[in-house]
Every structure is written in C-alpha cells, then in structure tokens.
Amino acid sequence: MGASDHTLTSIEICAGAGGQAIGLHQAGFSHLALVEIDQHAVATLRRNVAARDGWEFERKFCDIIHKDVNEFKPLVELENPAEYLGRQLRRGELGLLAGGVPCPPFSHAGKQLGKDDERDLFPRMLDLVDELYPQAVMIENVRGIMDDKFEDYRDWVKARLQGGKATDPVTGVEEELKGAGYTVCGWNVIEASDFGVPQLRPRAILVAIREDILGTSKFDWPQPREEVVTVAEKLGPSMEARYQPYIAQGGVAGQRAQEKLDRWKGKSGAIAPTLVGGSKKHGGADLGPSRAKAAWRELGVNALGVANSPKDVERKDSSDRDLFREEGPMLTVSQAALIQGFPPEWDFEGVEGREKPLPGKTAQYRQVGNAFPPPVARVVGEAIAQVLRAAARPAPDRLDGAR
C-alpha cells in the first residue's frame, strides 16, 4: 500500500463519537486521522475502530487523536498514516478533509454569537484547508448557520475557499480574497429523515472540490428518498426486547408490560424531533427542550431522562422508572443512537467516576445527541467520492494512446 494507489483518504476534525466517520467509511473513504477533544468520544472511537469488522485499514493506519484541533499539525505529527504512506503526509495528497465543527455559535438553541463565539472553529478548518490542500472539503453544521444574520459569514467562508469579495468577520473590512483553489458546490440543507433517519434533523453542509479535481465534472447533491423510516420501525425490535422479560413473567406483571408495549407501538408511527446533546457544563441527559419533550410524549416516549441499559446488570431493577411510567418508556442510549442512524453494533464509552464505575449515561448520550447522522454523511460522502474517483481515472485519449 501507499500514496500511489487509488484509496480515498480522509481526515476528520471534531470527530465526536464517529457519526460522520461511519458514514464516510461506508461511502468508501479510509480515515488517516480522527481528531476529537472529548475524552469519552475518543474512547468510543478507539473502542469501535479496534473491534468492528471492515475497519482493518483504520486499525492499522489511522491515528485517533485526543487533542484540541487548534493544536493539530497534520503534516508533521501523524504516525500510523506514515506507515501507509511510507513517510509523512504531504500537502495536496489527502482526498477529503471533513468536520462537523461545533454548532453552538450558530444554533437556535444558543445565543448565535457566530464569529464572536470562542467555539467557532470555521477559521481553523479553513487554515487546515490551506495546510493540507485536500482534493475535497466537507463541513457540517446546524441549519441556523443558514439564517440571514450569518450571510456575510457564509460569504466569507466561501471566499476563503473560492475567492471573491467578502467582509472579514474580525476586522469588518471588505476585501478581495484570492481563495484557496476550490469550487464551492454550495451550502445545502439536508434533512436526515429524507435518508432513512427517523428524526427531524436538518443539517447545513458545505462541499468544496479542488478546481483541478473537479475540472468539467459536476458535483450532484444526493436526492431525498421516497420512503420514510418511523420511530416504530427503527425501535420496534429493541423495545420489544426490553419489555419481553416482564411479559414472560405472565400474570398481572406480564399483562401490564404487554399493555405498555402495545400503547407505545400505537403512538410511535411518526418520526422523532431533533435529538439534542446538551451542554457539557449543565444538567444530565434528556431528550431536549420543552417542545421536543412534548413531541416525544406524542410518540409515547418519556423524554425526561435516559433509561438504564438492560446490560447494566450491576444496577437495581429500574423498570418502574424506565419502562412503566404513565408517560411511556424512556429511551436507552443505544436506542437514541438508532434514532440518530448509528449501526446497532456501535458502542459508546463514558465512565462516571465512582467507587464502582458504571457506564456514564450522560457522557454517552451527549455523544449521540451531538452526532452527525451516519446515513447523511454516507450519501454526501458517496457524491464526493464519485467526483474524486472520476478525477483519478485515466482520460480516454490517454487510454487510446496506451493501446
């Protein structure tokens, strides 16, 4: 193996628990580095990359880096990718630079401070574009960045990549930017429910392709699918598995469990509201603000917390809290992950510091709630991969000359 083959390589910043990484992996990209600052998310990435079938390339050649992305130096510090490349990564060699940069600066749930929010990592992402000069760039954020108040900011990001006049978000001065050699294929809002995710989760995605790679080709945004997956379809098997031990007891207890399960099935035939990861500083795990909780209640789900996992054998039976409240069952972390589009085998790390450590539901759920749905990352990744593969194929005239 080496840099001369046609492997589609990628580096992802703000990788979280792997939502985008899973989708891009499914789209055919091989990750050289996954960079994340949250220790629990890093543990999740390491656990799954080490254990999942199909991730052999990443096990051998990918660096999973626990670091502030502002300190990430991709052209000098990568270790495992150097084994694949035979040396350090060079500028212009990477296939895709991707990142779901933090959303609070633009989220309707926050203060929408934009450039004035210290968590705004768009400038760092653009600096990495300059450093790496990848063939393609993919940036994901909340729909709020598409609000009119951020039009100048979006124009500045586009001009940094493609060139043109834009107002510097720091100085407020309009200037002509030469760009970084990319064609911006647009900011597009993609609704996750259009691609098999049983959740209202619109995401704003920017795709840019290097000019020499795009050439006369065209990037085609993925088209929505006709079928919609409901909460009942996605969670049915796991919800039945949670109630089944109590149903199997028979008698009054069994009848009670069956009634609760049937009631949930009768109310869960729609898609869910947006899962919210919440703040690292405040509160525990629940399924969002008041409006979201009300929407969950209509789906027969108690959104005031997250249920204990059935695998948590050290815990006392918490079924009265988790399954049998009047509002309906609470979701487990793994069920929330299914709503987000994660594959069922993906495990989440997060340990609370106790005398006998137990899985930290809050740390785990926040990883799920803040994730980019893998199915959305996959369809956008497949569209990018199509352009990159076309650019890698020999031109017809060169093929003719080889005969």
Image (cartoon, rainbow, N blue to C red):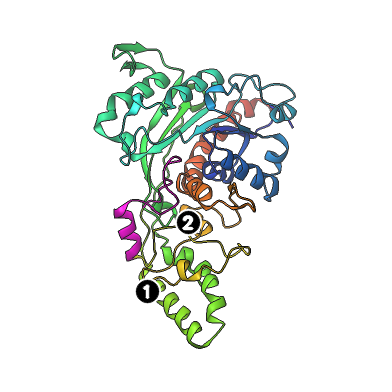
For the view shown, which residue lies furthest in the bottom direction? 251
Q: Residue at x 53, y 61 (%)?
A: 308
Q: Does residue 403 appear anywhere in the picture?
A: no
- Mark 1 lies on a secondary structure that is helix
- Image coords of residue 43 (percent x, y): 62, 42
Which label sits in the foreground, 2 or 1? 2
Calculate the distance from the C-alpha at mark 2 to the C-alpha at mark 1.
Answer: 19 Å
- Image coords of residue 64 (percent x, y): 64, 35
Q: Determine contact: label 2, label 1, CB under 8 Å.
A: no
The residue labelled by disc 1 is 266
- Classified by dominant secondary structure, the portion drawn in magenta counts as loop
Q: Residue at x 34, y 24 (%)?
A: 116
Q: Amino acid at mark 1?
A: Gly
Q: Residue at x 27, y 35 (%)?
A: 147
- What segment is highlighted magenta in the picture? 274-298
- Mark 2 lies on a secondary structure that is helix
Quadrant of the drawing holding the N terminus: top right
Label annotation for residue 336: 2
For the view shown, which residue lies furthest in the left direction? 148
Closer to the camera in the image, 116 or 191: 116
**In the shown orientation, is residue 214 left or right of residue 109?**
right
